[in-house]
Amino acid sequence: MEHAEDAGVYRLRDDLAIIQTVDFFTPIVDDPHTFGRIAVTNALSDIYAMGGRPITAMNIVCFPIRTMDVKILREILRGGLDQMREAGVLLIGGHSVEDNEPKYGLSVTGVIHPERILFNNGARPGDRLILTKPLGTGIVSTALKAGVADAALVARSVAAMTTLNKRAAELMAERVDVHACTDVTGFGFLGHALEMAEGSGVGMRIDASSVPFFPEIRRFVEEEMIPGGLIRNRQFREKQIAVGPGCPNWLIDVLFDPQTAGGLLIALPPDSAKSLLNGMREAGIDEAAIVGEVTAAPKGIIRVE
């Protein structure tokens, strides 16, 4: 907890530890089956970010059973179960309560060798940073609620949010020189990158032109159609961001956009980063990119150029 890790780890024996995490939230899309898939993808991501393999899960359900059709709940749970099956995770139970607003997620248990755990505080100067998914899901969700997001953009956002980080984590786990990893979620790309920089005692330089995002969201940002979480993220962290003269303000907002089921942010040496990125591209993780590097100074500061 001291370093804002993605999940908790408990060693059972010298060669085995368990990883535990929990996450649930309200619907961010209209289709209940899709919502179930997104919620599960998001919950499993913390296990992958620690380098582990999720094995079991328990449902967490809040639902207004008196005012909403129970068929909606069935579809949410079916979507979640479909996603767990894709991940190779066994559903072993859960708990439900009556609530005025539907909420869904998981408590997840994973496994890992104690010597293979990845933390978010091991980045070293000279490391390159890989981001495995495009940014912008929070902005797209806000535009969807306002009824101005077109179907193609929503479909791309949903595809990103329902893509497991499983394959990216497997490829990452094949390497012994990965120094740090986290997943990009509610604090946005820059918020989670700063957690890594602070915990590692380093700085970072981000090449804004290399960061993958949905290009259609620019107009929403310029029209100030952005989630409240983005504003809070930026207000909390903007003093630690040094923006170069060539980086537009709207793009900084994108880098602070709170993500749901976002990608992994990985720090590792330059040659290994290029090799891992090639492996990801070959595995169909097409939008993964090297987005910057770790610097020795200034510590706890990210320069975006």
Image: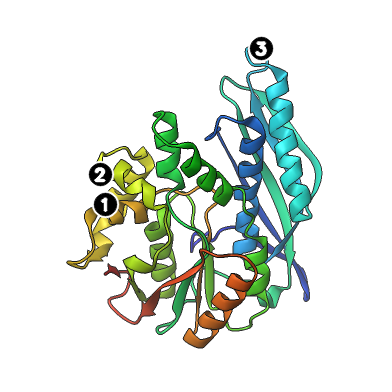
Quarter location, residue 111: bottom right
Label 1 sits on what residue type?
A: Trp
Q: Secondary structure at mark 1?
A: helix
What's the mark number on residue 222? 2
Label 3 sits on what residue type?
A: Arg
Which of marks 1 and 2 precedes in the sequence? 2
Does residue 56 appear in the picture of this structure? no
Q: Which residue is mark 1?
A: 250
Comparing 64 with 87, the one in front is 87
Asked if labels 1 and 2 touch by Cβ distance under 8 angstroms, the answer is: yes
Q: Please tell me how crowded label 1 is: few (under 14), some (14-19), or many (20+) other residues with Cα within 10 Å.
A: some
Q: Please tell me how crowded label 3 is: few (under 14), some (14-19), or many (20+) other residues with Cα within 10 Å.
A: few
Q: Residue at x 49, y 57 (%)?
A: 184
Q: CA distance from mark 2 to mark 1?
A: 6 Å
Find residue 172 and report its horizontal and vertical position in percent: 62, 73
Q: Please tell me how crowded label 2 is: few (under 14), some (14-19), or many (20+) other residues with Cα within 10 Å.
A: few
Left or right of residue 216: residue 107: right
Label 2 sits on what residue type?
A: Glu
Q: CA distance from mark 3 to mark 2?
A: 41 Å
Compared with 269, 27 (above or below) is above
